[in-house]
Amino acid sequence: MEPFAVPEKCLGVVMPAFHEEGTLLQIVEKVLLRREVGELILVDDGSTDGTWGIMQELEKTDARIRIFRCEVNRGKGAALRTGFGHAESEILVVQDADLEYDPDEYPKLLRPILSGEADVVYGSRFQGAAAGGRSGSWHVLGNKVLTRLSNLATGLDLTDMETCYKMFRRSILARIQLREDRFGFEPEFTAKVSKLGVPIREVAISYRGRGYAAGKKIGWKDGVSAIRCIVKYRFQNNE
């Protein structure tokens, strides 16, 4: 692949966090080392540990950081809506507050957007050599089943609908209305974007999954909810 120059400060990162005091400092440091990051929006989703206090200290260290807080825990989707509402960058990416996804792969995600090939890019954990580093076999199977169901509903040909790494032009948000509060954000966003007719691409990414002992939060109930969302948004419009 030919070298690709990524402009400085062209990307906004939206990072929801719930009880992530153990990893927040590390992932923020990695994000801020990326020259393409122009803003980092941290949203505390009602944490009761030290997450909010860490965010308050981080905000003092870099002008690119802005912090917001949900007074009660509502879920990833609700926190992301808060962050999206304050974003100013023309291109946005979702970044979890753990260490499962590597910000060093932002340029790989940015390339299809900056070259005009795509308006939305998904980072796939299940493409080629990127398919290693799993958090558990039932998670892999569950993700693949949900992705298959989502593809049947949307007509897309994704390999990883549930991925955290969704990068897109901010103008996309003006054309859809997001409503899901928890992890239903993933199938809802996918369903609604699929109806816009914009080019969507996937790129292979690395992944270092963690288990529940290390703070993983998604569970089987979220899988059931994802199926509900796949069916629901197959038939609903984007409002």
Image: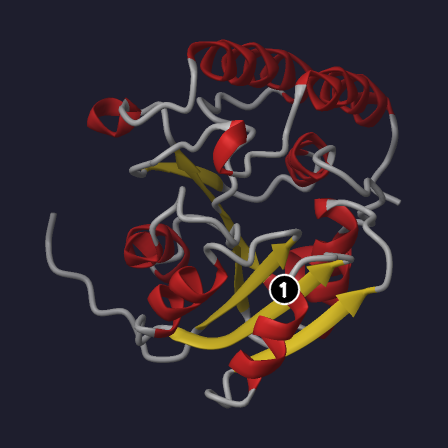
Colour option used: secondary structure
Q: Observer-nearest residue: 122 or 207?
A: 207
| Figure check: 91 above or below 117 | below
Expressed as whole percent of the image width and height from the top left, the position of residue 148 reads 56, 12
Q: Observer-nearest residue: 161 or 100?
A: 100
Residue 92 shown left or right of residue 72 in the figure: left
Q: Residue at position x 68%, y 30% from top?
A: 187
Q: Observer-nearest residue: 100 or 25?
A: 25
Q: Residue at position x 66%, y 56% from top?
A: 172
Q: Helix, strand, or loop for circle 1? A: loop
Give the quadrant of the C terminus: top right
Amino acid type shown at disc 1: Gly
| Figure check: 157 above or below 122 | above
Please tell me how crowded label 1 is: few (under 14), some (14-19), or many (20+) other residues with Cα within 10 Å: some
Query: In the picture, residue 7 is in which quadrant?
Result: bottom left
Q: Residue furthest left?
A: 2
| Figure check: 11 above or below 201 | below
Expressed as whole percent of the image width and height from the top left, the position of residue 128 reads 23, 23
Q: Residue at position x 62%, y 80% from top?
A: 56
Expressed as whole percent of the image width and height from the top left, the position of residue 62 reads 46, 87
Residue 234 shown left or right of residue 124 in the figure: right
Residue that label 1 marks: 50
Residue 1 shown left or right of residue 39 in the figure: left
| Figure check: 219 above or below 145 | below
Expressed as whole percent of the image width and height from the top left, the position of residue 51 reads 62, 63
Residue 32 shown left or right of residue 120 in the figure: left
